[in-house]
Amino acid sequence: MISIALVATAVLGVGVPLLLGLPNLSILGLYVAVPMIAAPTVARAARAGSATGGGWSAPIRVDWRVWSTLFHLAVGALVLVLIATEVRPYAFYAGVSFLYLCCFLLITTTPTGRTSRAIALYHLAVTLSLVIYSVTLNYGFFVGHTDLSSHVPMTTAILETGRTATLLPSYEPFQLWHVYAAFASLVFGGWIAPHTAMYLLSGGLFAAGVGLTYGVARRLHPDEKYGLLASLVAIAFPLYLFYGMYSIPRSAASILFLALLLALLSRPTASVRLLTVGLVAAIVVVHPVTIPFVLAILVLVALTERALTGSEAIVDAYVLAVSFLLTSLYWLYAAEFLVVRLAETIYAVLFESTESAVPEGVIASPWVEVANYVPYGFALFFVLLGFLFLLERDRLPTYADGGGDAVRDDGRVPSRRTATVGIAAVLLVPLVFPGPVLLLDAVAGVNVDRFGHYGFMFVALVGGYGLYELLRRGGLAVLIALLVILSLFTFTAVSNDFTASDNPVVERPFYTFYLSDDERQSFEAVDDGYQGEIGTDRISCRYMGELHGSLCSVIDAGEGDAMFDDHDVVLIREDELEDRPLQFTRYVEESDLPREELEERDRVYDSGSVSVHS
């Protein structure tokens, strides 16, 4: 019934918008609809194969040193590519995909054991680190969605003054991440810039998240290979890669939540209970705005497991009470402005009209959006497979192990706890995957996409189970098919415009997520030479305003040919404009920029990458 419902939902999701005259939404829905149809089909085929005696009864065994040697040779070659090129070429993405395949073959063809586990986790961590640092440490200044333009000067101010006071009072209650980054910069003697320290710390935290994901998975399922495959899916999920690059307090909170899940799945001893309190407190202090989303996910898990009787609770009343109490105390005594903001948001959603609009990228270039959502489609395919396999296995008889968990009599099937996580993961799909999230944001007027910071681990856990079951039930042909699927999954994961805005395979009509060294030097020169207000694009204005204290304003693109009239001085990022539109109050292509008006002005500065007109 669920398989039929998935297929029917997929057809309706594409067909209804088309009938309503919204073909762009139908196109966007393809990346969700295809896996919703493919997963039930593959699950039924796998079930039929198992029933007829199929399965990989004689797995291939290969010495781990073969894959490790190939892996390290490829890593060395990719590092040379980064040194030799200004912008990562497509060949770099193909090389990284090869690293993922080496990790997959290392996991699937090497006998399990403590040594092989450590080796596999090491290779996964190196792969993730290379993807993250090839952006954040390879380019001038990674800004992501521009939040780093605010967080870096806070860290710099702590270094310069030794105090956590900031020009943005709303951030004062959660300066722990900035203190951490400032301390790291001091440890290195100050020769590492504050933003570089933030990039290093964030990448290191997410590399540690590989081991945490493995630990969480092993507490859900006894098979070691499942834990490693879940970690592999985690580092191939674009949100995990992007947040590892982003290096802001929310990034640190994501890993803390992953550690909290590990504690919740451990035996509830006194020390674990105390650790749980500490982790909840850490999340609240590192980023108080995170905890409502964490609480919502914990409540979802609690409600799901209450509906599935017969398993030990992952989230009990103690955890929810502690989370609510610590949040309330900290918000009321250290971050009371959040209470006011939350009340205003709830009031606006319930009683005020919000502007509902389809996201701009879907309108302008729906096929480009879908092309960049392809890795999410692969991830959803594995999630739905894991969900269907979990429901199927959950019907089999169980017995209890020494820890109180239900374990199947074949020793390989997980407990109802895993089914709880599987159902929670499917319920979180509309809040984690970008297409539905963009529409929910537009309708609700709130940052629903924040759930992606904390829900990606559920995607990894359930997607990893889908991959694990498919591999366990299939034969050599399935292994070869999975190699093809994973090569496409991982290649698109590291080359889409969300994680590779430097040189994406399919470019979206939005800005690049980093500022080059030439651009930053130009901003500094302009700030030194001119003290008045400057009209420019949003990314430049936020960087110059936050890091240099420049007077600037974002140009109103709605004025058309008169968009520069209200500004005595205009700054244009010429290099960026050659490749992408500039984000003023809306995105403006080179062909739509009123160059005639600029030509009537004096070009008072031109570095090649940045020009200033007065």
Image (tube, rainbow, N blue to C red):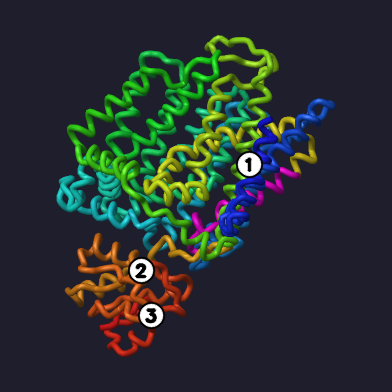
Q: Residue at x 66, y 16 (%)?
A: 408
The numbered dot on residue 584 is 2
Task: Determine if the magenta segment contains residue 184.
Answer: no
Return the disc, 2 or 1, that comes first in the chain's sequence.
1
Q: How busy is the neighbourhood of tag 1: few (under 14 within 10 Å), some, or many (20 plus)?
A: some
Q: How busy is the neighbourhood of tag 2: few (under 14 within 10 Å), some, or many (20 plus)?
A: many
Q: Which residue is mark 3?
A: 608
Q: Residue at x 47, y 32 (%)?
A: 212
Which structural element holds mark 2?
loop
Which amino acid type is marked by label 3? Gly
Which amino acid type is marked by label 1? Thr
Stretch in magenta: 481-502
Q: Measuring from the top left, give residue 282's x and y in whole percent.
A: 31, 32
Q: Distance of mark 3 from mark 1, alpha carbons?
A: 52 Å
Which structural element holds mark 3?
loop
Q: Measuring from the top left, give residue 269's x and y in whole percent.
A: 40, 13
Task: Note whether 162 is above or below 555 in the view shown.
Answer: above
